[in-house]
Amino acid sequence: MLVRYSASLFAALFMNMVSANPKTTENKENDLTEQQTIHLVDKQIAAYNARDIDAFAATYHDDAEIYVYPNQLLLKGKTALIERYKQTFTALTMLRATSVQRIVKGNYLVDLERAESSTHPSQEVTRRVELIATYEIEDGLIKRVTFKR
C-alpha cells in the first residue's frame, strides 16, 4: 500500500522539529553542517539497504532514540537498535529505502522515504510503504529519528 503525504504536512513536521530545537550558526558553518547531515543519513540508508548491521549501527549515537510520531518511544540506545534491526535484517531477503524528497536545515533532516522489503526468496517486493523520517544529528551521529507513516 502506497501512502501519500501532502507537502504541507511534510513542511509542518519539519518546521515543528526545527522550532523545537533551533540551531543558530553562520552560513558557512551551517552549509558544512548540512553537508555532514546529508552524508550521515545517506550512509545510514546505504547500510540499511545492504543489511549491514555494523555499518548501520555505526551511524547512530549510543543514546539514540527512535520514535513513532508524535512521541511514542520505539527504542532507546544503540544496543536496543542493534537487537531490533539485526532481527529485521535477518528476517528479510531484501530491504531498500530511498529518499524521495528531502529538506535539510543544519543538523536536522526530513526525508520522505520509500521503503520496500521482501520475505520472498526471489527478493520480489512484498511490502512497500512511504513514510516521513525526521533525523536529528548530535556529535556527528544520529541521535533521534521520528517516523510518521
Image (tube, rainbow, N blue to C red):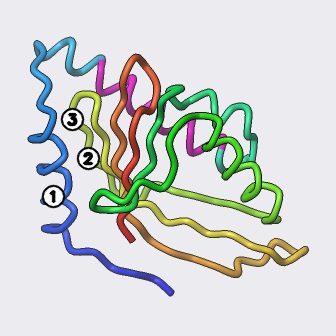
> Is 77 within the magenta?
no
Crowding around mark 3 (Cα neighbors within 10 Å: few <14, some 14 to 19, many 20+) is: some
Q: Position of residue 9 (x, y in %)?
A: 18, 68
Q: Element under label 1?
A: helix
Against 117, residue 85 (above or below) is above
Q: Element under label 3?
A: strand
Camera-side residue: 126 or 58?
58
Secondary structure mostly seen in the magenta stretch: helix
Camera-side residue: 69 or 149?
69
CA–CA distance in space, label 3 to label 1: 12 Å
Amino acid type, residue under disc 2 in the picture: Ile
The residue sitting at 75% across, 49% down in the picture is: 86
Q: Position of residue 143 (x, y in %)?
A: 41, 32
Q: Is residue 34 left or right of residue 58?
A: left
In the current view of this chain or complex, which residue is farthest to the bottom?
Answer: 1
Q: Which residue is mark 1?
A: 11
How many marks are shown on the rendered structure?
3
Crowding around mark 1 (Cα neighbors within 10 Å: few <14, some 14 to 19, many 20+) is: few
Of callouts 1 and 2, which one flags the residue occurring earlier in the amino acid sequence?
A: 1
Amino acid type, residue under disc 1 in the picture: Ala
Q: Position of residue 69 (x, y in %)?
A: 32, 62
Q: Which residues, given as a range, are shown in magenta? A: 33-47
